[in-house]
Image (cartoon, helix red, strand yellow):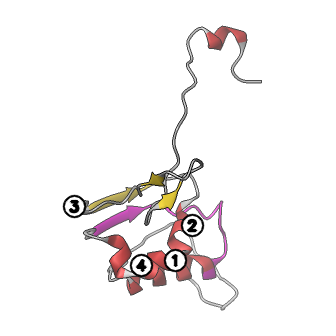
Amino acid sequence: KLPSESQKAFLERISVKCVPFFGFRKGEENEIVKPALVPGVTFVKLDCEGSEIDILLSHAASQESSWLDVTHFVMEWSFTKERRGSVFRTAMSNLREAGFEVFYQGMGSWWDAANVMW
């Protein structure tokens, strides 16, 4: 069980506020929570331990207006977290619909349910 008694002397627990990637939302106490993506941001490197999938599959991800001023976007897709090629292609399609030019590379070849190798 973490933290151990010896770790407690060195570790400090802090609260981390979760914020939406796109758009505003109401918080637990009805306060307005600002999104992570704000005007003026032109480069996004998205790394949120698998939540990239949910973000990129959202309707907002396919809308150019959701991305505000972003012109460059970088992310890592983990096929250990989501192996279905169809889900990967949907996420990439959403990025293309939003106006991004999509490039990717990986190791190995995969066949998916649509009988597509990539």
Q: Can residue 75 be seen in this view?
A: yes
How many neighbours does mark 2 have within 10 angstroms: few (below 14), some (14-19), or many (20 or more)? some
Give, as a single range, the part of the protein colored magenta: 72-86
How many neighbours does mark 3 have within 10 angstroms: few (below 14), some (14-19), or many (20 or more)? few
The C terminus, quarter of image: bottom right
N-term mark: 4 or 2: 2
Query: Do labels 1 and 2 touch, CB within 8 Å?
Result: yes
- SS assignment at label 2: helix
Q: Mark 1 points at which residue?
A: 91
Q: Name the residue under label 2.
A: 53
Query: Do labels 1 and 4 touch, CB within 8 Å?
Result: yes
Q: Which amino acid is tagged 1?
A: Ala
Residue under the point 55% across and 75% down: 57
In the rendered view, tell whether residue 20 sits above or below residue 12: below
Viewer-nearest of labels 1 and 3? 3
Q: Mark 3 points at which residue?
A: 40
Viewer-nearest of labels 2 and 3? 3
Q: Position of residue 7 (x, y in %)?
A: 63, 13
Q: Is residue 118 visible?
A: no
In the rendered view, tell whether residue 43 sits above or below residue 28: below
Q: Tell me the distance, in whole angstroms, between the alpha carbons under discs 3 and 4.
A: 19 Å
Residue under the point 66% across and 83% down: 112
Q: Where is residue 98 in the image (x, y as percent from the top left)?
A: 37, 82
Q: Which amino acid is tagged 4?
A: Leu
Residue under the point 24% across and 63% down: 42
Q: Tell me the distance, in whole angstroms, between the alpha carbons under discs 1 and 3.
A: 24 Å
